[in-house]
Image (spheres, helix red, strand yellow):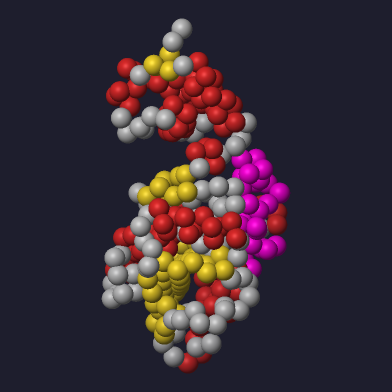
């Protein structure tokens, strides 16, 4: 029997729902649109478009991969974050809603300044820095990562989202000293690797088997990158400049203590959009011991 796009959507929806997928409608809609080369924003038309058997089989094959644990974003090759669509592949972590509040706070700080310079460390897809450049038209961003794959993806997202000329992409090891010639910044933002040694052994299969471990593991206690950034990179902040970090759900107090140990002022902890205390921020001291 010939099927419409809507028939395929309902078939996939039932499969995802039976498998207890947390968002069966979203997963089915995204996968159906991708497999059938359909517009996911014009689903009202899906009941009038008929498919060949090969396309129906392909949609179900993709669904098999999802139900076997492969993240939907890697199958699609893109994912939405902060209202923008970013290219993703298995060399980068998938942008998550957990990080949107960090992005929002970065944009709020940037809008308070004239031609703000933003340093995005451990940039991955570049989602934070690129979103900030997209939202703040006079912002200039330097996105840093050590992964060649991440740098390639970030450059492609810079191109796709039209912020060339205002987002520079640089390779550097955030655990080491910054390279020469980085300049100074009003805002430093980072969503670094922060999974602990124990947590790495307990990761969900969809993360453990598919997402890059080097973008996850933050040392035995998950805090290696916060120590390194505060010790080695915070000198790139202008006096009074702001640092903002995402961290694990149990780590906020520890990250705040690291900032305090490096003489940041105005240190605070705030929640992500799910109410989890995941964001830590502070200002580089205007003078004295905060200078590096």
Rendered location of residue 232, percent (x, y): 58, 79
Rendered location of residue 135, percent (x, y): 31, 60
Q: What secondary structure characterizes most of the magenta part? A: loop
Residue 109's place in the image compared with 29, above or below, is below
Rendered location of residue 77, percent (x, y): 50, 42
Specify start and end residues of the magenta stretch as a single range: 200-224
- Does 214 lie within the magenta span? yes
**Residue located 50% across and 88% down the image:** 291
**Residue located 42% across and 58% down the image:** 158
Toward which corner of the image does residue 248 lie, by quadrant? bottom right
Toward which corner of the image does residue 64 lie, by quadrant? top right
**Residue located 51% across and 25% down the image:** 59
Foreground pick, 93 / 19: 93
Residue 289's place in the image compared with 177, above or below, is below
Considering every residue shown, the one lying at the far bottom of the view is 288
**Residue located 54% across and 78% down the image:** 233
Rendered location of residue 39, percent (x, y): 35, 32
Foreground pick, 292 / 211: 211
Foreground pick, 236 / 179: 179
Residue 34 seen in render? yes
Residue 218's place in the image compared with 239, above or below, is above
């Amino acid at each position: 029997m010939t099927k419409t796009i809507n028939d395929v959507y309902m078939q996939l929806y039932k499969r995802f729902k039976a498998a207890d997928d947390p968002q069966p409608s979203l997963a089915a809609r995204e996968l159906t649109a991708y497999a059938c080369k359909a517009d996911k924003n014009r689903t009202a038309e899906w009941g009038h478009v008929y498919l060949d058997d090969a396309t129906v089989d392909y949609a179900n094959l993709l669904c098999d991969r999802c139900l076997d644990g492969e993240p939907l974003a890697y199958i699609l090759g893109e994912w939405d974050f902060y209202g923008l669509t970013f290219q993703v592949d298995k060399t980068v972590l998938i942008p998550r809603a957990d990080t949107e509040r960090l992005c929002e706070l970065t944009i709020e700080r940037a809008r308070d300044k004239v031609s703000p310079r933003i340093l995005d460390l451990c940039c991955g897809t570049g989602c934070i820095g690129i979103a900030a450049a997209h939202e703040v038209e006079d912002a200039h961003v330097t996105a840093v990562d050590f992964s060649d794959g991440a740098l390639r993806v970030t450059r492609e997202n810079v191109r796709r989202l039209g912020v060339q000329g205002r987002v520079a992409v640089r390779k550097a090891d955030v655990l080491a000293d910054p390279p020469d010639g980085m300049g100074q910044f009003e805002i430093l933002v980072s969503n670094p690797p922060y999974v602990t040694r124990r947590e790495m052994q307990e990761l969900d299969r969809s993360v453990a088997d598919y997402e890059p471990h080097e973008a996850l593991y933050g040392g035995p206690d998950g805090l290696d990158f916060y120590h390194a950034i505060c010790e080695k990179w915070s000198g790139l902040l202008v006096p009074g400049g702001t640092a903002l970090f995402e961290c694990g759900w149990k780590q906020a107090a520890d990250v705040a203590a690291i900032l305090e140990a490096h003489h940041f002022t105005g240190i605070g902890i705030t929640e992500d959009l799910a109410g989890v205390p995941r964001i830590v921020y502070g200002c580089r001291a205007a003078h004295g011991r905060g200078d590096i």
